Amino acid sequence: MTTFIRNPHVQEKNLSSDRLLYQSEQQTLYTLNQTAAFIWDFCTQNRTETEIIDHIQTICRDVPEEVQAEVKEILAELCGFGLMVQVNI
């Protein structure tokens, strides 16, 4: 089973409606959109893709059918940038 969790070396800063993440190993700053920030907030512990999608559908109204594809894309980007870690357990 594959899970996702925040990279502990990433620092976070909230600025009004923006969420900024600083990846210290790469010395790079990233801005998260609302969906990515929601996923980031939820992944303080290991979470599967299904758990993330279920959480979004439970919390949010009128979730579009494309949510699964969007979550996959966001997770791939967050992992690719080193902001989150993919763990096989």
Image (tube, rainbow, N blue to C red):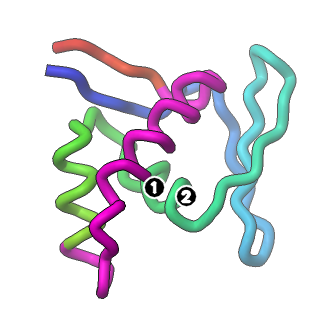
Residue depicted at 65% across the width and 26% down the height: 81
Residue 59: percent from left, percent from top: 27, 77
Q: Give the residue pinned by disc 2.
A: 37
Q: Which residue occupies 48% across, 49% down?
A: 40
Q: Does residue 75 sit above or below 38 in this rendering?
A: above
Q: Is residue 40 left or right of residue 33?
A: left
Amino acid type indicated by mark 1: Asp
- Residue at 28% in and 67% down: 65
Residue found farthest to the bottom: 61
Location of the N terminus by quadrant is top left
Residue type at mark 2: give it: Ala
Position in image of residue 16 (x %, y %): 77, 77
* Magenta region, residue range: 58-84
The image shows residue 61 at horizontal and vertical percentages of 30, 86
Secondary element at image label 1: helix
Find out whether the residues at labels 1 and 2 contact each other: C-beta distance under 8 Å: yes
Q: Is residue 4 left or right of residue 37?
A: left
Q: Position of residue 51 (x, y in %)?
A: 18, 49
Residue nearest the observer in this picture, 23 or 54:
54
Q: Is residue 17 left or right of residue 57?
A: right
**Quadrant of the image containing the C terminus:** top left
Between 9 and 20, the residue placed more toward the observer is 20
Residues 77 and 37: in front is: 77
**Residue 13: assigned label:** none
